[in-house]
Image (tube, helix red, strand yellow):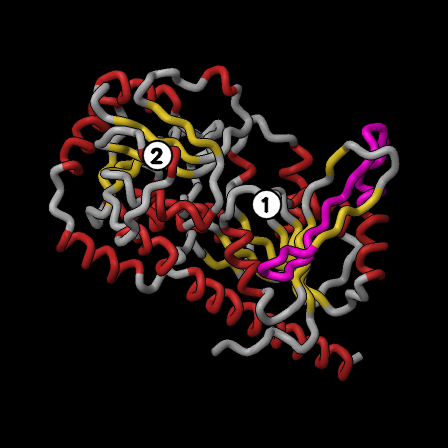
Amino acid sequence: MTRPLKKNIDLICFSHLRWNFVYQRPQHLMNRFAKEQRVFFVEEPIYDAPSQFNEIYEDPVSKICIVTPHLTSTNEDANEALRHLLNIFMAEMIITDFIAWYYTPMALAFSDHLDPELTVYDCTNDLSSFKSIAPTLQEWEERLFKKADIVFTAGAYLYEVKKDQHENIHPFPGGIDIDHFKQARDLIKEPDDQLAIPRPRIGFFGVIDERFNIDLLEAVAEKRTDWHFVMVGPTERIDPVILPKEPNIHFTGIKDYKELPAYLAGWNVAMIPFQLNETTKYISPTKTPEFLAAGTPVVSTSIHDIVYPYGEKKFVRIADTPDEFVCAIEELLKFEKMEWIKEVDTFLATRSWDDIWKQMKEIMDRTLEKKSINRNKSKIYA
């Protein structure tokens, strides 16, 4: 049983991801923190208001307070407006002792005046490798690295790139809610919109965005018109017009996190057809262990954090071309899973979100204690 980080200490999470979008890393971790302390989840602003205000509501399950700033489209200094709204909110909620947890460095532009007990940067990508990214974002990340007491990285490969930039940095690839996805092994009732799709079914869930290799999906579907491809998730940052129209590719749209095991239960194979470029170079997709926990064989492009360790352990087939994908799926459709599932379960047993959260918390405890000792020493010798 982990002890509370500190009595009455709050946590403010600054995120570029919306709380009610796809359920992923921020939601998994913040929900666990919320069991022991107040958690406030600050989203990026929406520019749609006649005058600036904070939209505030409480998540009914986790009791996390979600804060969405609304600004006018004519705000000349958005950061100054956001700073003002943040100060008002913190005063209203009587937030004094708190941890600042960042997913987006840009939030530092309106929160750098805060004096948290602890600053944590949960880094999910290498922004310096993005050629198209705004220079100001890279600059704010450099500032965040200097301000942060702790840096976590969302992947092993990302850690290798960042490890020399901070003295208190730790790799934590995506975890798995094992019991949730194991439900797929026993579920019988099919979701209504999947029921009529013929088998064999090859599935994917997640955000369908610029990281997704649409051309690869289309080519594989054209080569095997007798297979059906079920794509579960929202479309983001790509024009829906370019999505393939083959009759054996089925886009279901976004689904609730609790529904995902029911979809997985009806798939013969899961696929991760991601592009191999700067946007995917350092990602560690959480869907990899989720597919495996469901007992579903997986084929993926050669994303580093999937190749190592999942590919090298033969838990996931690695393929990059349409022909390689077809061959891998053909093998997996005839795959004997019994021994494979035993090995997968043993491997996943230590990679749960609960384990990751506890390990993070221990690092945060130690860092808080060290900061407290150093402060006391400073007072003595002042």
Q: Quadrant of residue 323?
A: top left
For label 2, the crowd category at 10 Å Cα-Cα, with few meaning under 14, some 14 to 19 and many 20 or more, is some
Mark 1 against mark 2, which lies toward the viewer? 2
Q: Residue furthest right?
A: 51
Q: Which comes sooner in the sequence, label 1 or label 2?
A: 1
- Badge number at residue 380: none
- Magenta stretch bounds: 58-82
Whether residue 283 can be seen here: yes
Residue 379 location in percent, x, y?
77, 80
Q: Residues within 10 Å of mark 1 (few under 14, many from 20)?
A: few
Q: Is residue 251 above or below residue 82?
A: above
* Residue 157 higher or lower than 90, as above or below: above
- Residue 147 visible? The answer is no
Circle 1 is placed at which residue position? Answer: 20
Left or right: 317, with 279 as reference point: left
Q: Foreground: 89 or 84?
A: 89
Against 328, is 291 above or below? below
Residue lying at 23% horizontally and 38% vertically, measured from the top left: 268
- Report the residue marked by disc 2: 194
Find the distance from the CA under tag 1 to the CA under tag 2: 23 Å
- Is residue 263 positioned above or below 10 on the image? above
At 53% from the left and 58% from the top, the residue drawn is 29
**Residue at point 19% right, 46% down?**
314
Whole-percent x and y of residue 200?
Answer: 22, 32
Q: Is residue 166 left or right of residue 96?
A: left
Q: Which one is in front, 89 or 376?
A: 89
**Count of numbered badges drawn on the protein:** 2
Residue 313: image location, x then y, percent: 21, 50
Mark 1: amino acid: Asn
Provide residue 293's location: percent of width, then percent of height: 30, 53
* Image-quadrant location for residue 87: bottom right
Residue in front for this viewpoint, 50 or 97: 50
